[in-house]
Every structure is written in structure tokens, then in C-alpha cells.
Image: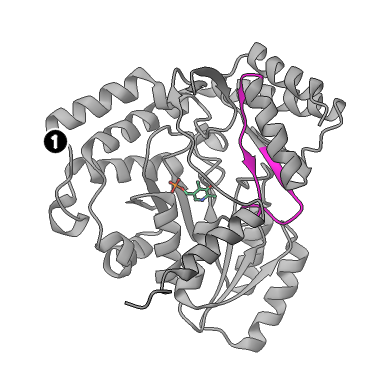
Amino acid sequence: MKPNQWEFMDRALEERKQGGRWRSLQAVEPVDGVRVTRRGQTLINFSANDYLGLSKHPALIRATQDYTQRYGAGSTASRLVTGTYSIHQQLEDTLAIACGWEAALVFSSGFQANATVLASLLDREALVLCDRLIHNSMIQGILLSRARVLRFQHNDLDHLEKLLQRAAHRSPSRVVIVTESLFSMDGDRSDLSRLTHLAQQYGAILYVDDAHAMGVLGRQGMGLTAHQPGIDLVVGTFGKACGCFGAYVLCSAKIREYLINCCPGFIYTTALPPGVIGAIAAALERIPTLEQERHNLTQLGNNLRAQLHSLGYDTGLSTSHIIPVIMGDDDKTLRLSHWLEEQGILATAIRPPTVPLGTARIRLALSSAHTGDQVNQLLHALQTWNG
Ligand SMILES: *Cc1c(COP(=O)(O)O)cnc(C)c1O
């Protein structure tokens, strides 16, 4: 064994430390839908993606227990072997109908779905045109396929159109537009109607990640891609507003057949466990009824943004329940995060490379379960900070 074969690791870790980019895991214990404890201190959580507080909902917990009792702790095999139970199929049928799509297919996680679905959709001759700010999981799928990729400026569809006009010169096998409906770190939306038109006009495939809109936006809260013809594939997750775990693809019946036959990340992995399927089913049953919660969330967001602006904070392009407080400087962002923790607020610093250089931020994620008092406590802490 060569003595220096682990040197790459030392170098990578040293680089992270030097650049102030060190990441470490900090355990918390959940208290309720919006509070956790860390090192004995109770904190109001403004960093979770549990936008409707469903992760602690009694109906979801009961369904998890019930399905586990009836079907076991694990699903025993991949979907194509013995891992497809009637509950998996029912869930896909329910989801497709609720979202107004022809077909749905469940995956293990959003990360895994994006990485594997994109990889099986692309080849080396394909051309990907993606938004500059798409989630890392989509980048992994694109890299895995070795397709050619060009990024357009964030939500700049004039730029996208220029790239589409030039795409023909490269004679790609196909052109795939990849973007998000509601951006995870900025809380702004893309223009799905114009994206759909562009895709149609230029004969491109349109792939949209709906992770942060599912449960919160769109008809009956089923996401911004619900009942939206003209999009070819949607990936969404059950790990955010649905409060549980797992992911899904919405697509045509043909694409579903293709993924079942040709997508390694569907074929070669164990099906989601029954308990998780139960929780998802319970979440999907509830979500259409949560109009009041969605209304609260919108109000909380509008109010928080307005207050942050009056305190002189920069919330970027946010128009939703995801509100970045953009500080720019990495150290300053970390100091603010620490200050907030001292004040009883959990608000994690998000730094490059998760976000572009010079845009380090505190990403505030609201939940319909947050109270006005809790938001005021956050605002008070931000007001009294003098970093
Ligand atoms: C969180 C996230 C994912 C990954 O979903 P998981 O189910 O957590 O793996 C994918 N896309 C976007 C935009 C996300 O924010």
C-alpha cells in the first residue's frame, strides 16, 4: 500500500478548513413541528423544509404504524422483483390523478431520482440547457450522462431562447431544458408557461424539479406542475412539505414504461418501505384540505419579507415561504447564524458552493405551524444584531 494514497483526503479537508468551508453535523432533537433542542437549548426552527408541519401530524404517524404492522418494516426487494405491493401502485395512481398527469412513478429520494432519471434521459450527444441555480442532484445526473451542458442565467428565458436558437448548430440527439419551479435557495419561481412555450417551439424536452412547491403551491397544493400540460417530466420529493420521505416522477405512460425498463436507479434499488408509503398516502390525503395552512404560510412570508426589508436586509428574489437573508460574506453569515442560535433561533448558514460565491445567506424556511410570536422573536434577534 502506498503511504500517500490518502493524501487527497487530507488535502481536500485542509482546503475546506482553510477556505472556511468546513461542514460538520450538529444533532438536534425534535420537540414539535417547529421547535428542536440542541445542547440543552430549545430553538425555534427556521431551517426545516417541513412547510406544513406534517412530519409530526398524528395521521401520518398512525399511517406509518398501521402500514408497518400490516406489511412489515421493509419491502424486501426492488420494485421489479417482489417490492411492488398494491400500496405502491395505489400511491402512484392517486398521485397521478391528484396532480393531473397521465402517470407517476415513485423513487427513493429526490436526489436519487434527479441523478438517475436525468442520466437515463440523456446521452453523450444530448444537449442540456439548465438554469444556473439548479439543485446539485440534477447536476450529478447531467454529469453522469456526460451530455453537453450550457447554463442560462438564473430565470433568464431570453438567454435560454438564444441558447435554443444556437442549439441546432450542434446537432444534438435531443435538447433537454432543466430547471426548478420554485428555487430552493432563493424562493423565487420560474415562468413555467413561457418555458412550456419555448420547449414546444424549439422541440425541446422540459424537465422541472418541483421539490419545494409540492404541498404548498399549485392547484390544491399539489405543486406548480400540477395540471400543467407541456412539461415532459417532473421530479418532486415527499421529504419536504409532505413531511416524510421518498420522491416521484410525473410523466406520460410511455416515459413511465421507459423508466421502469431503462432507469438503473429505479431497477436496482429496494422499494420504499411500507411505513413510508403509508405516511405519504396520509400526507397526500391531507394536502388538498390545507388551504388555510397555505394561506397562513403566504401571509407569514409576506409579513416576514416586508419586516426584513424595513430592517435593511436583502431577501433577494424571494416571493415565497423560502426567504434568503443574503449577507454575501461567509464569515458574517456564520456569525449571524451563531448569534441567532444564542437568541433561541435555528437558522443555518448556507455558503458556497451550495450557493454562488459572494451570496452566502441565512435561508429562512417558514412553516404554517410557525406563530406570529415566533416570527417576531426571529425579527427581534435580527434587529438587535450588530455584526
Ligand atoms: C431537497 C431537494 C432535492 C432532493 O430531494 P430529497 O428527497 O431530499 O433527496 C431535489 N431537488 C431540489 C430542488 C431540492 O431542494
**Residue at 60%, 49% in the rendered image:** 181
Q: Position of residue 303 (x, y in %)?
A: 74, 22
Range of residues picked out in magenta: 343-362
Amino acid type at circle 1 is Tyr
Q: Secondary structure at mark 1?
A: helix
**Residue at 42%, 32% in the rendered image:** 243
Q: Is residue 356 above or below residue 127?
A: above
Q: Is 272 included in the stretch rendered in magenta?
A: no
Left or right: 375 with respect to 382? left
Q: Position of residue 251 (x, y in %)?
A: 42, 57
Classify mark 1: residues with Cα within 10 Å, few (<14), some (14-19) or many (20+).
some
Q: Which residue is mark 1?
A: 71
As drawn, the residue found furthest toward the top would be: 373
- Magenta segment's dominant SS is loop
Q: Mark 1 vs ligand 1: CB under 8 Å?
A: no
Q: Position of residue 123 (x, y in %)?
A: 45, 79
Q: Nearer the viewer, residue 276 or 354?
A: 354
Residue 231 visible, this angle: no
Q: Quadrant of the N terminus?
A: bottom left
Q: Nearer the viewer, residue 63 or 382?
A: 382
**Residue at 51%, 69% in the rendered image:** 142
Q: Is 354 included in the stretch rendered in magenta?
A: yes
Residue 307 visible, this angle: yes
Left or right: 157 with respect to 354? right
Q: Position of residue 300 (x, y in %)?
A: 67, 22
